[in-house]
Image (spheres, rainbow, N blue to C red):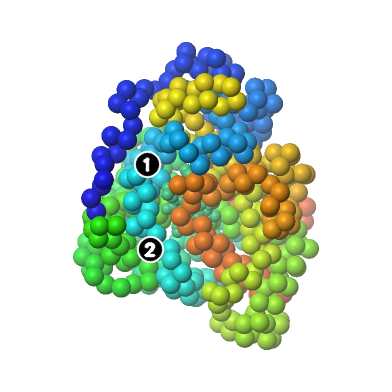
């Protein structure tokens, strides 16, 4: 595929990093005595830390991080300004590169403007209804196979179990591979890359996670590179084969390197986000058994309407969730949305301004880092009354219509809105359709979840769950 522009030409040549002197007019804390200490404090409870900053300084404040000095802007208006990006002020690439460049370079999120638009359009073939239907069949089969091995009647750690399940599912729908040793090797390389992307040591020094990540990337690049010729000119119901045959507006195929980079990035974008969101939904259904029961009733009704009339526990393999029935799982979808509100898998979204801009009367110079915060927005009492309460009914059509469009942004918005959003709903629905058909989710008596919120939320104790046959 011929890139229409050199990405470097997208930004002003004189774009500079910003220092405290450039943002001294913006309210905010003084430079930290110890950046590490401040970071540790922030990471321990980001919602509390941002809420304290917002209460002290208001919805825009300056901050210092690994990108230098920048600003955080808060609330639905801030989200709209940055995500909708009407005036092409904010670069996604320059925001994400410091986090992802070493192991996941050139993914869609690390592209901007026309260059990004062309690649996104080319990749979107793999998200059309026909391939989605095929992925669903694979997901259903994989979910039944893997959950059948989960222990029932005694507690197990849900988070690592669903993480493995999501990886296994990706072998089929992303790579078109049967589950086996090859898929396992790929999964290990990929896991190392994901861990490296959030490692504290940012250089691939010996024995560091970053080194393992860079090696994992080399392994996967080699694997994809060798496999691409076998997939060109073929049809296949997996993302990889489709990317190998996707063409741009001028009929050009993606180059081998472009396919490799898109595949690596796609697997990263999908994996921990899905794992995190399904974990938080299991947690909230365990905490709210009355909601769990309502969802189970809906699942039973859908099964009844689509050929499984037993109405009781599902005989493994007896009832498949048809693609056409996905829309009927309305309560499941609302509960998933509510879980994504309370614990958004991408709690903060970074950008860098490539033009000067103004927010709430403060002029911010080009070059500044700019962060928005879905986690904070999702807990703002003025948009979400009684914000800590789990209430899927917040997402009825009527309740949603009265809310700011950018008050709920777990999938981002605008040009970079999550390309895998429908895949995420589909996998979550397939999973909960199966789980609720067969089991009751039980948490330990009086259990209160404690989630590590960044980089991607996960329960600190792995989430002890007991599945009881229903
Ligand atoms: C609950 C699960 C998921 C959540 C919460 C989520 C969240 C997000 C968010 C917030 C962004 C935008 C980031 C930004 O604007 O900087 C994004 C982008 C993206 N996501 Fe997801 N994601 C999920 C699942 C998936 C899945 C399953 C896939 C693939 C099958 C996927 C593929 C992508 C891609 C390719 C992008 C980049 C889009 C672009 O830059 O044009 N995501 N996701």
Q: Residue at point 67% right, 31% down?
A: 51
Position of 185 with respect to 270 (left or right) is left
Mark toward the start of the polypeptide (1 vs 2): 1
Position of 256 with respect to 55 (left or right) is left
Give the number of marks: 2
Marks 1 and 2, how far apart in space? 20 Å
Q: Residue at point 56% right, 53% down?
A: 276
Vertical order, 393 against 23 (above or below): below
Q: Position of residue 246 (x, y in %)?
A: 30, 62
Q: What SS does tag 2 mark? A: helix
Q: Position of residue 169 (x, y in %)?
A: 46, 66
Residue position marked by numbered label 1 in the rendering: 112
Vertical order, 144 against 361 (above or below): below
Evaluate whether residue 389 shows in this view: yes
Quadrant in which residue 283 is drawn: bottom right
Position of 261 with respect to 173 (left or right) is left
Q: Nearer the viewer, residue 96 or 75?
A: 75
Q: Which mark is residue 378?
A: none
The reply to whether the C-beta atoms of the residues labelled 1 and 2 are less than 8 Å apart is no
Binning the other alpha carbons within 10 Å of mark 2 as few (below 14), some (14 to 19) or many (20 upward) gives some
Q: Position of residue 338 (x, y in %)?
A: 67, 53
Q: Residue at point 48% right, 39% down?
A: 85
Q: What SS does tag 1 mark? A: loop
Quadrant in which residue 301 is drawn: bottom right
Q: Residue at point 39% right, 23% down?
A: 17
Q: Nearer the viewer, residue 464 or 242?
A: 242
Q: Quadrant of the C terminus?
A: bottom right
Q: Position of residue 200 (x, y in %)?
A: 44, 35
Vertical order, 453 against 284 (above or below): above
Residue position marked by numbered label 2 in the rendering: 125
């Amino acid at each position: 595929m011929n890139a229409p522009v050199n990405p470097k030409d997208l930004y002003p040549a004189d774009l500079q990093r910003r220092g405290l002197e450039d943002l001294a007019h913006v309210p905010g804390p003084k430079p930290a005595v110890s950046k590490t200490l401040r970071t540790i404090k922030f990471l321990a409870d980001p919602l509390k830390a941002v809420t304290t900053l917002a209460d002290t300084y208001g919805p825009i404040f300056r901050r210092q991080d690994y990108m230098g000095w920048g600003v955080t802007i808060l609330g639905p208006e801030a989200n709209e300004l940055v995500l909708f990006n009407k005036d092409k002020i904010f670069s996604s690439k320059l925001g994400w590169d410091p986090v992802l460049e070493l192991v996941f370079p050139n993914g869609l999120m690390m592209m901007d403007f026309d260059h990004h638009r062309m690649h996104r359009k080319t990749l979107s073939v793999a998200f059309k209804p026909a391939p989605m239907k095929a992925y669903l069949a694979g997901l259903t089969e994989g979910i039944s196979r893997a959950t059948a091995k989960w222990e029932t009647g005694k507690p197990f750690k849900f988070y690592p179990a669903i993480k493995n399940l999501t990886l296994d599912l990706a072998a089929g729908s992303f790579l078109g591979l049967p589950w086996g040793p090859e898929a396992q090797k790929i999964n290990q390389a990929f896991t190392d890359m994901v861990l490296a992307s959030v490692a504290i040591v940012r250089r691939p020094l010996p024995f560091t996670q970053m080194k393992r990540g860079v090696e994992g990337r080399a392994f996967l690049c080699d694997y994809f590179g060798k496999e691409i010729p076998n997939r060109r000119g073929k049809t296949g119901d997996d993302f990889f084969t489709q990317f190998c045959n996707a063409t741009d507006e001028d009929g050009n195929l993606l180059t081998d390197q472009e396919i490799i980079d898109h595949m690596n990035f796609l697997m990263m974008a999908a994996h921990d986000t899905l794992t995190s969101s399904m974990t938080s939904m299991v947690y909230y259904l365990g905490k709210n058994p009355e909601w769990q029961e309502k969802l189970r009733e809906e699942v039973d009704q859908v099964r009844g309407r689509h050929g499984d009339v037993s109405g009781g526990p599902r005989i493994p393999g007896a009832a498949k969730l048809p693609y056409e029935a996905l829309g009927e799982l309305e309560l499941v979808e609302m509960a998933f949305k509510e879980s994504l509100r309370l614990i958004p898998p991408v709690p903060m979204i970074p950008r860098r301004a490539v033009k000067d801009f103004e927010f709430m009367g403060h002029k911010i110079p080009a070059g500044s880092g700019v962060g928005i915060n879905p986690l904070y927005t999702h807990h703002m009492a003025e948009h979400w009354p009684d914000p800590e309460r789990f209430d899927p009914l917040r997402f009825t059509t009527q309740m949603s219509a009265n809310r700011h469009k950018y008050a709920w942004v777990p999938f981002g918005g605008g040009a970079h809105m999550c390309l895998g959003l429908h895949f995420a709903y589909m996998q979550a629905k397939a999973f909960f359709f199966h789980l609720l058909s067969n089991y009751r989710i039980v948490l330990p008596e009086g259990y209160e979840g404690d989630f590590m919120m960044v980089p991607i939320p996960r329960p600190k104790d792995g989430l002890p769950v007991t599945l009881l046959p229903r």
